[in-house]
Amino acid sequence: MAKITYKTPIVEMQGDEMTRILWDKIKQYLIEPFVELNVDYYDLGLVNRENTKDQVTIDAANAIKKYHVGVKCATITPNAQRVTEYNLSKMWLSPNGTIRAILDGTVFRAPVLANGIKPFVPGWKKPITVARHAYGDIYKNSELIVDSEATAFLKVEYKDGRVEEKKIADFNGKGVLQGVHNLDKSISSFARSCFNYALDVKQDLWFATKDTISKQYDHTFKDIFAEIFENEYKEKFEKAGITYMYTLIDDAVARIMRSEGGIVWALKNYDGDVMSDMVASAFGSLAMMTSVLVSPDGNYEYEAAHGTVTRHYYKYLKGEKTSTNPVATIFAWSGALRKRGESEDNKELIAFADKLEKATVGTIEAGYMTKDLTSLFSKEGVTVHALDSEEFLQAIASRM
Ligand code: NAP
Ligand code: MG
């Protein structure tokens, strides 16, 4: 059988620990037998980040800008313990943070569903994608403890000399104070990423804030989304048969619980932080959660939502077999290959991505899975088999 080929390279970013081991096996068992891989390769493993003084991360991000599609393995974000463990010259920044800053994007997280793994919310039949704005609000705040009677103000000094001031509160004793901000440019690029993603997956888009209470701040988010939708996306949405809905955050939370899923849910930074953990655990497992960074000018970076699974890696180093779940990483590859297929109108490659996902989910549905899923799985007439990572990959390969 001739292998499937494509023209433009995909940016491949190797990572760390257990996911680094799985990465090579996924390619070996599930991709290389079928696809002639054409990649621009960057080793983002911590050893190479140290050797290149983290230049490799910047190069990889720029390569994604050039080729528009990347696939990334989980990587270690160094902390003090890692500095010692890897003998680092510096506590290098999070690669995801560096890449996000260069690509200027929004992170979309969606669960992989398998029949037999029941969501904790019984009504959820289709995936819910959380789209989290990744700039500003409380994550770039300025806080103060007020230690006695005081009056606090918001003050803006414009470059043209104007000064605007507004009272926040009179403190009649101790209290706390916080200033937050966001930028129209960042909100606009967040909105466009969400509209583009919804069109891509052909699902309705919801956006929610608390604009009834926050009449300037949250209302600006609402207005920017509305304006961009009217001017740039309304017709495209109609053509695709999908809708955009704005609603209050509390209403959205209530509606999500009653929905069937199949929605892209755009959220402000804090709401997205909280709700993505709620959605991920309600669907079953972090190891089944995919993640893609989409930038407004059309760059896509696919990865798993989980980390490098350190605990399993230390077992692996002792020579033990591990039952680490490769599903989210397999879906990172299928996502990148499908996107490349779409960009080149390569039907064979798109079909391969579909088959790879189908074989992966089908293997689980037939009762063959890694240990993290066994306690979540129940399906009448199906016996559950707990496999190690390699056996699971082989089971998917033979199904393909
Ligand atoms: P983690 O790697 O996601 O693992 C936490 C625990 O979740 C694991 O010990 C395991 O539980 C379970 N788990 C996660 N993924 C799994 C999988 N695929 N299969 C089976 N079980 C899985 O998080 P962490 O231990 O907090 O972080 C480890 C390293 O990853 C850190 O250095 C961190 O910086 C990095 N990290 C990277 C990214 C990224 O690159 N996107 C994201 C998060 C964290 P059990 O041990 O109970 O089996
Ligand atoms: Mg969080």
Image (cartoon, rainbow, N blue to C red):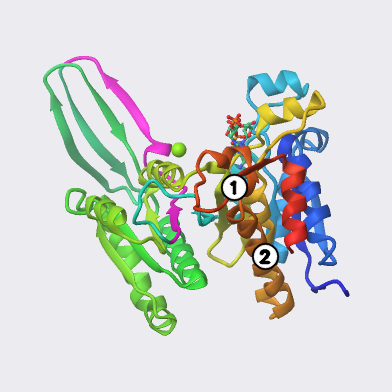
Circle 2 is placed at which residue position?
68
Q: Looking at the image, can residue 358 be seen? A: yes
Q: Does the magenta stretch include residue 121?
A: no
**Quadrant of the image occupied by residue 181:** top left
SS assignment at label 1:
loop
**Quadrant of the image occupied by residue 277:** top left
- Amino acid type, mark 2: His
Q: Nearer the viewer, residue 138 or 127?
A: 127
Residue 321 lies left or right of residue 189; in this view the side is right
- Amino acid type, mark 1: Thr
Residue 236 lies left or right of residue 357; in this view the side is left
Q: Give the range drawn in magenta.
A: 126-148
Residue 290 lies left or right of residue 334; in this view the side is left
Q: Residue at x 88, y 75 (%)?
A: 2
Q: Measuring from the top left, give residue 175's x and y in whole percent.
A: 21, 21
User: What label does residue 383 carry, if any?
Assistant: 1
Q: Which of marks 1 and 2 is in front?
A: 1
In the rendered image, which quarter contains the N terminus?
Answer: bottom right
Q: Is residue 137 magenta?
A: yes
